[in-house]
Every structure is written in C-alpha cells, then in structure tokens.
Amino acid sequence: MFGMQNNTDTSRPSWDEYFMKLAWLVAERSTCLRHHVGAVITKDRRILTTGYNGAPARLKDCIELGCLRNQLNIPSGQRQEICRAIHAEQNAIIQGGFQGVNINGSSLYCTHSPCVLCAKMIVNAGIKKVVMSTVYPDNSYKELFCEAGIEYYSLNLSSLSITRKE
C-alpha cells in the first residue's frame, strides 16, 4: 500500500492522554516565570480552544518586566490577584467567547489543577469535565466542582513523551 504503514503498535495514547499532552505543549508558550500552564478545551473529541498563562494580549509580560510575586516572596497558591498573568484556563475560556465557540458541555484539560477563580469561571462556562496533571496548592475548586456536578480527576503523565515513527 503506497503511503500507508502497517501500524501494529497498540500503545496509542487514550483521548485523555492525547489532550493532556497537547495541554503540556500549549504550556510551552507561557510567559510566566513561575509556572508554565496550558489548557485545552474539547468537545466530542475535537479541540475547541487552547490557552496558556501570560500577560494580557499586547501588554508587557513577566519575562520582560519580572515577577512581582517573586519580588514580594508570595508563596504559590496565594494572592493570585496581583499576578500580571491571565491563567491558562481563563485564556482558553476567553478564546471561546472571542472566537464565538460554544464551550458549554465541554471538557477542559489543564496541566495544573485550577485556582478558585478559574474554578468559578469553569462552572459558569458550563464545562462538565476537568482533567488535570499537576496539583496546584489551592484545593478550593473541589467543593465548587462537586456542588456544580463537574467531573474532575488527575491524570499522571510522569512518563510524558512523544512517540515518532518514520
């Protein structure tokens, strides 16, 4: 068969692993000096939007200005409101609105668990499932998600890799 390979490898990633790998790839665009976070919103196994953490569009970012939270020695998970960056989950949700993409009933894949502010936006956006890879030191999302009926769980990708076949 011209142009086709007989693929006998059955180690394809699951859909959750696939979308989580994409979230980690999106995180590479982050301009945050502390955490590189990426998010992917999907529905019916299709990518709707992506987002990473960084300064608002067309504004100076922390790579250029430095990190105020680092300068003030603020621990991770505290005082998020003074951070210049918009979180990855927020950017993915905003992109849905900006592009006119309906994310109601979707799933969100994020490299980190959400802060309480992102959790509130996730609830109001109508997202029904959240899959995360790394735990962020703010667990207040759990109560909100349980009350809202949002399915959530962690997906350990400790051996994250991309398989290339030539």
Image (tube, rainbow, N blue to C red):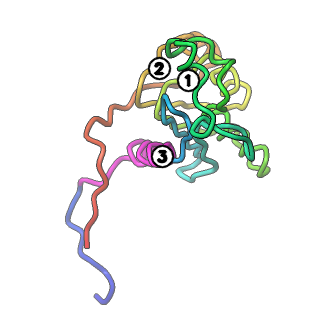
Stretch in magenta: 11-28
Please, what is the three-letter code of the amino acid marked with disc 3?
A: Glu
Q: Residues within 10 Å of mark 2 (few under 14, many from 20)?
A: some
Q: Are marks 1 and 2 in contact (CB under 8 Å)?
A: yes
| Label 2 sits on residue | 136
| Label 3 sits on residue | 28
* Mark carried by residue 114: 1
> Does the magenta segment cover residue 102?
no
Looking at the rendered image, the disc whose residue lies closer to the viewer, 2 or 3, is 3
Q: Is residue 105 above or below residue 22?
A: above
Q: Is residue 4 above or below residue 14?
A: below
State the image coordinates of residue 17 (x, y, percent, origin top left): 38, 43
- Give me the C-alpha separation between circle 1 and circle 3: 18 Å
- Give me the C-alpha separation between circle 2 and circle 3: 18 Å
Residue at 56% across, 18% down? 71
Residue at 37% across, 32% down? 155
- Give me the C-alpha separation between circle 1 and circle 2: 7 Å
Relative depth, front residue between 147 and 132: 132
